[in-house]
Image (tube, rainbow, N blue to C red):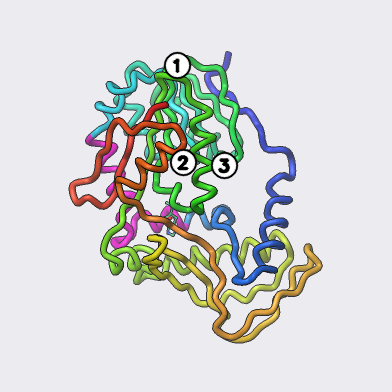
Amino acid sequence: MSPFQLTRTLPEHATEAALRSDVLHGLTRTPKTLPPKWFYDARGSELFDRITELPEYYPTRAEREILLARAGEIAAATGARTLVELGSGSSDKTRHLLEEFSGLEAYVPVDVSESALRGAGRTLLAEHPGLTIHALLADFTAGLTLPDTPGPRLVAFLGGTIGNLLPDERAAFLASVRDMLAPGDFFLLGTDLVKEPSVLVAAYDDAAGVTAAFDKNVLSVVNRELGADFDLDAFAHVAVWDAEHEWIEMRLRAESAQSVKIPALDLAVDFAAGEEMRTEVSAKFRRAGVERELGAAGLETVRWWTDSEGRFALSLSTP
Ligand code: AVJ
């Protein structure tokens, strides 16, 4: 049997139908919204990679510091024989874990990008020839059936991406993670922490303008996929700290009144001058809140680690 297999659980054209539905619903409500998952076409993924290297964007470095320091402890505490990674992307972060996981037999990356899954599979197999890789082309928010690989399993969701889900989506997602786990399995979760608002805002509105380009890229995706005529120069990137919800909100502000045509939806959308459309929330967490939300999903937090500056946390929980 080949050490690399890919299972497709996304129906053909599922992505296109989901984009149409998201754009239709998001742009016909008040205030307008577009979900953050549409940032990540090839250019958006490249811009995100550049964001992770910006001086203002600390989460990636902070999480890497924890992974490097704690990978051995995570391996020992879980005894994992299968590592499942939700939203694995390039699997860059996973590398630190795999190096310490001597007992690991299977790696299950889950992502919506087939090219990312194949690329990561190729690189990781070269580094770990004994490993079986069972890639899942799937939307991890939808509830997953995992391949039949040996337990205990460690399911990892890194990068703070849980913060991009709204509270009710988060509860549903954590419940679906709980459903993937058997007794003795573990969940490793990366969460960005509440801190000084100026630090947070700078991380989402960098001086070089990379995040602004990333934010506007969603308009290019809608233009290309749905034939829309968004003028990227007519919108400005906005990042605000919402102290009540404790999340960063990214928005695109129409700099003048305008009408945008979206032929694939047979729709024209009017923007008032100064109107702001939400493109992302990125929630920031406190330890008590993370433990409460995990607990509500039936997961007990057994470990909590932060980077040396207390900016980011990894938690380990179990059913
Ligand atoms: C995908 C969760 C890691 O919310 O920080 C980066 C995406 N958006 N800059 C985040 C993002 C703007 C990012 N994560």
CA separation, marks 2 and 3?
19 Å
Q: Nearer the viewer, residue 130 or 187?
A: 187
Q: Provide the secondary structure element on which disc 3 rests.
A: helix
CA separation, marks 1 and 3?
22 Å
The kind of residue tagged 3 is Thr
- Specify which label sits upstream in the sequence, 2 or 3: 2
The kind of residue tagged 2 is Ser
Residue 121 showing in the rendered view: no
The residue that mark 3 highlights is 141
Which residue appears at 36% of the width and 68% of the height? 206
The residue that mark 2 highlights is 90
Location of residue 201 with respect to 16 vertically, above or below: below
Residue 245 showing in the rendered view: yes
- Specify which label sits upstream in the sequence, 2 or 1: 2
> Can you tell which of label 2 and label 3 is closer to the viewer?
3
Residue 55: x and y in percent read 29, 61
Q: Quadrant of the C terminus?
A: top left
